[in-house]
Image (spheres, rainbow, N blue to C red):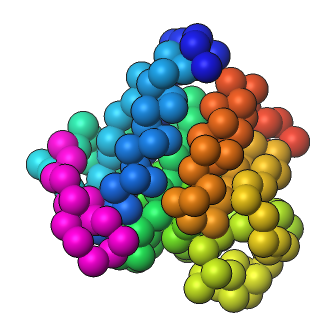
Amino acid sequence: MADELRGRQVAILAADGVEQVEYEQPREAAERAGARVRLLSVHDGEIQAMNGDIDKGDRLPVDAVVSTVSADEFDALILPGGTMNPDRLRMNAEAVEFVRSFVRSGKPVAAICHGPWTLVEADVVRGRTLTSFPSIRTDLRNAGANVVDQEVVTDQGLVTSRNPDDLPAFCAKMVEEFAEGRHTAAARI
């Protein structure tokens, strides 16, 4: 990874309770590949990262509130996990619409662990193949997804993984898909 993402704008959408390592490693991978990465959240200031949903991690500075930006400003989206993070995002209409806009436009989206919960709320998983943390797989199936148990799954620019153990494969596939850009076959208007 060197310049695959040079000039690309990548959004990370997260809220309080984001799993720190699932935020840090994808961000670092995108930046190493040359992307400009911005942290978006449902409020300004900082969000509280967590380690294993139990121990507080770092406080992460928010670059912009999701309600003040458009999906058109970004080339790709990262949805890290952590149990409370996507639960909070699902309750925010602007966050849900931001995610929906990304998927419907065919722009690449990478979601790990509990991150796909936000995809369920955005109603964009029907007919897609993905993976996730085991506890949300029933939700994904009920939303019409084809759920598999694999380290990393790609479906027309949608990259998903199960947990922090999958981060090396997730980050590599994420950079590859982000470099490919928009997947017109995946665009759902």
Instruction: Report whether residue 130 is seen.
Output: no
Q: Position of residue 118 (x, y in %)?
A: 52, 67
Question: Could you tell me which residue is drawn at 75 percent across and 26 percent down?
Answer: 180
Q: Which residues are magenta?
A: 48-61
Question: Could you tell me which residue is drawn at 70 percent across and 39 percent down?
Answer: 173
Q: Position of residue 38 (x, y in %)?
A: 35, 34
On the rendered structure, is 71 left or right of 132? Answer: left
Q: Position of residue 129 (x, y in %)?
A: 82, 64
On the rendered structure, is 142 left or right of 64? Answer: right
Q: Position of residue 156 (x, y in %)?
A: 82, 46
Question: Could you tell me which residue is drawn at 77 percent across and 55 percent down?
Answer: 153
- Main SS type for the magenta part? strand
Residue 53 counted in the magenta span: yes
Q: Is residue 26 above or below residue 123?
A: above
Residue 109 counted in the magenta span: no
Q: Quadrant of the N terminus?
A: top right
Question: Could you tell me which residue is drawn at 78 percent across and 64 percent down?
Answer: 150
Count of numbered labels shown in the rendering: 0
Front residue of 24/65: it is: 24
Using the rendered view, name the quadrant where residue 54 is placed.
bottom left
Q: Is residue 4 above or below residue 159?
A: above
Q: Is residue 159 above or below residue 177?
A: below
Q: Residue furthest left?
A: 45
Instruction: Report whether residue 163 is seen.
Output: yes
Using the rendered view, name the quadrant where residue 151 is placed.
bottom right
Q: Is residue 20 above or below residue 105?
A: below
